[in-house]
Amino acid sequence: MLESNHSGNGSAPNNAVEQVKSGSETAPRTELEDRQDLAHAFRLAEAFGFHEGICNHFSVSLDGDAERYLINPYGTHWSEMQPDSLLLIDGDGKVLEGEGEVEDSAKFIHIGGHRANPRHKALLHTHMPYATALTMVNKGRLAMAHQTAVRFYGRIEYQDTFGGLAVSAEEGERLAETARSKQHIDVTFLSSHGVVVGGESVARAFDDLYYLERACRQQIFAQQTGGELKELDRDIVELTVEQINRDIQQFSDAHFRALSRVIDNNPNHRFVF
Ligand SMILES: [Zn+2]
């Protein structure tokens, strides 16, 4: 039932998607701003239940000439992540600043991913439950059956083979190859594993991460009724994605700033997802 025959299942680029790319340039950010944004993203992701143990990584490519990334150290829980918890690493994964180590899988997936598509300043990898559930179903696809799913139209890639734990350079290279050859892709579903979401800023990538999980949850709820999904016609999908893309950057920024304010003002705030 998850298989979509609709041509708008997230595999093809389109004009509307191109529009948002060109209109979503962001001003250069300082390392401190990137550290603050990334730390907020970790704590928010934990608050929404997107984390799994102390696994998975979020990374940011710093603006500037040198190849530098911020990434989480092994062993720090996402709920305790602060700007100075993050490691500053170079293109070989060598730690330049900070306490702790970077896992090999992080180097393979994140450094390779940033290099392959420099538009992706932020790369967020999670095993969040609803999106991951779709990766466990034969030909699991996010159907264009709800307006939240439609925002991802033309920006999704599906890797339908699981090759073991992502501890080898092989999986990183496979991901990087996709990122290199399909620059419009922002979301990759990894079979029997999880998702990787890339964006031009931490705010943009986090907003996509949040709405991706919402969209997957809505689809799974709809399918639990036993009814058949109502896939939207392609012309309606294209109209809707164009409408969404008009102000998605501003909306993403406003959403992420609001969420960040909430946890700054009350670190114990419990969100309802
Ligand atoms: Zn993973």
Image: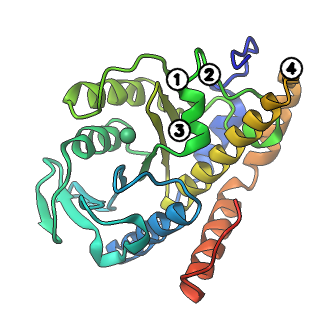
Q: Amino acid at mark 2?
A: Gly
| x and y, in percent, of residue 111 in the image | 26, 44
Residue identifier under label 1: 158
Tag on residue 130? Answer: none
Residue identifier under label 2: 140
First in sequence: mark 3 or mark 2?
Answer: 2
Rounded to the nearest angstrom, the CA distance separating label 3 from label 2 is 18 Å
Q: Nearer the viewer, mark 1 or mark 3?
A: 1
Q: Nearer the viewer, mark 2 or mark 1?
A: 2
Rounded to the nearest angstrom, the CA distance separating label 1 from label 4 is 22 Å
Asked if residue 150 shows in the view, the reply is no
Asked if residue 201 shows in the view, the reply is yes
232 left or right of 68 in image: right
* In the image, the residue with mark 2 has its CB under 8 Å from the nearest atom of ligand 1: no
Q: Secondary structure at mark 3?
A: loop
134 left or right of 86 in image: right
First in sequence: mark 4 or mark 2?
Answer: 2
Residue identifier under label 3: 186
